[in-house]
Amino acid sequence: MDKLCIEGGRALNGTITVSGSKNAALPILFGCILAQGTVRLSNVPRLRDISTTLKLLEILGCRTTFEGNEVTVRPEKIVPEAPYELVKTMRASVLCLGPLLALLGQAKVSLPGGCAIGARPVNLHLSALELMGAEFELDSGYIYGRCDKLKGAHITFDFPTVGGTENLLMAAALAQGETVLENSAREPEVVDLANFLNAMGAKITGQGTSIIRIQGVSSLTGTDYRVMPDRIEAGTYIVAGVITGGEVVIQDCPFQELDAVTYKLREMGVWLEEKDGCALVKRHGELVGVDLVTQPFPGFPTDMQAQLMTLMCLAKGTGVIEEKIFENRFMHVQELVRLGADIRLKGRTAVVRGVPKLVGAPVMASDLRASASLVLAGLAAQGKTEVLRIYHLDRGYENLEAKLAGVGARVWREKE
């Protein structure tokens, strides 16, 4: 198992190019199951979750290749079972449920795993698919689904679930009749999936709003498609430039999809400018603490909560962070405290009081975004920081240490 070593206190200066979005690429890859023909995807990040998904697609009956950042998927003889050995490592694996039911009328999918950041039940997926005619039973850790033919339905989600919206988009694309999704997720990654399905011949409108309409079609074709850039990676590197006091250009930055993040950063005293698809970022005077609440898009993203908390650790005054998406997403707090942060927890609320400095120490990552927050803290801390269990980072950040080293960070990987 690897650890990441960081010698902090070096200002980052230069250009970082944002990779393709993991959270967009994963559902798009599962959407390839529906194609009659070859799908060619570009701007796909080389990450552990992508490799896991490609292995799962092979088991499900697709032929895949991955060269550079381009993936080719050709569905051949699709089979309905997604085994525990792969699904246990990655929550997004449940996204094969909708496509399999739509294509085959049956599915056997292991209950998913992933980051330990709280309960993310799939009941919203199942209850919505039941309205389209599917029947389910849970047995021995597997979801068994069956239907004659999925039929369009009017579905209102109890909560704007990203995974549920994505599963239903894929299921409804080949269903009979019209499906209407109300209170659907509005995240840019959901929009990217809908645009991809439309490129294959689906008839989806309203993506990016709370009401999405899908007119079922009889078949979908292969296509060429470019995955959107990763807004959370872009936000993470923006914070890296600010927290080290440097000046960084973030290339291929999805600036509009980061509105809630950039608003809070400017409120803290960060200077940001958009130019030719890039974000120019630097600290503008003294940073100040702010209050923020995580919300579904277009609100502040839970996936940037840990990174902003780390930045607030070195800001003047006090900021309050309320986590409304996941009930267990403050596991990075005690590790930041080990580096000298002043953070008090009460339920889903964290009170962050700024300190003059952080000091390097060994810390342990608990999930993907917590890992990123500890790396950011290490970049700013005095002395050496060791981030243990960085396999989480490899699930979500492509070439992180190389990108940081390219703008002046002293960072390297060692065996624990």
Image (spheres, rainbow, N blue to C red):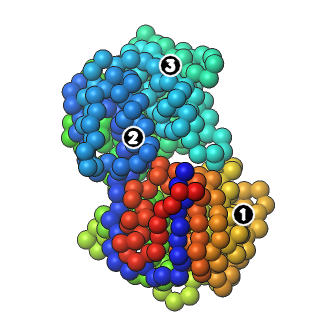
User: Horizontal placement of 326 versus 237: left or right?
Assistant: right
Query: Going 36% across and 49% down the picture, which residue do you hit?
Result: 46
Instruction: Depth check: give the residue in front, 151 or 188.
Output: 188
As shown in the figure, which amino acid type bears the numbered disc 2? Ser
Q: Position of residue 160 (x, y in %)?
A: 54, 43
In the displayed structure, 194 sits above or below 47; it is above
Determine crowd level at label 2: few under 14, some 14-19, many 20+ residues with C-alpha closer than 10 A: some
Residue labelled with disc 3: 108
Residue 261, above or below 146: below
Residue on which disc 1 sits? 334
Label located before the other in sequence (2 or 1): 2
Q: Secondary structure at mark 2?
A: helix
Q: Earlier in the sequence, mark 1 or mark 3?
A: 3
The label on residue 51 is 2
Reading the chain from its start, which is encountered first: label 3 or label 2? 2
Query: Distance from label 3 to label 2 (Cα)?
Result: 21 Å
Marks 1 and 3, how far apart at CA: 39 Å
Relative to 173, say whether 347 is above or below: below
- Tag 1 near tag 3, CB within 8 Å: no
